[in-house]
Amino acid sequence: MTVLRGFEALAEALDAEDFPMDKQAVAYSVGDIEVEGRGGALVPVRVLLDRIPGDQFGNVDAVVRALRAAARA
């Protein structure tokens, strides 16, 4: 089984999705992808989504921006 990691893999996976998407749809689609969080630890997207206010994302860039900010917090 291949584990997808990183924001690039996340963006590539989301390119196949239809937007807008809510958090639940993002979690279902890419929740198991791990991205680098604070201190270099890998964190599943599903965990980071809980740290993001709001529920809707208009495009891939909006998801990636929000997750990057949550990963640094």
Image (spheres, rainbow, N blue to C red):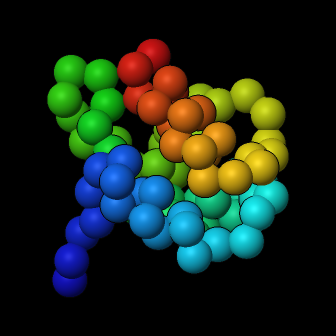
Residue at 65% across, 31% down: 52
Occupied quadrant, residue 29: bottom right
Left or right relative to 18: residue 39: left
The answer, for residue 64, to whether it is visible in the render is: yes
* For residue 29, above or below residue 61: below
Residue 28 percent location from the top left of the image: 60, 68
Left or right relative to 4: residue 22: right
Residue at 19% across, 29% down: 40
* For residue 65, above or below residue 27: above
**In front here: 16 or 55?**
16
The answer, for residue 33, to whether it is visible in the render is: no
Task: Specify the quadrant that holds the N terminus.
Answer: bottom left
Residue 34 percent location from the top left of the image: 33, 52
**In front here: 63 or 40?**
63
Q: Can you name the residue that lies furthest to the bottom here?
A: 1
Residue at 42% across, 57% down: 10
Task: Specify the quadrant that holds the C terminus.
Answer: top left
Question: How many numbered marks are there?
Answer: 0
Residue at 50% across, 27% down: 70
Residue 55 percent location from the top left of the image: 79, 43
Residue 35 percent location from the top left of the image: 33, 45
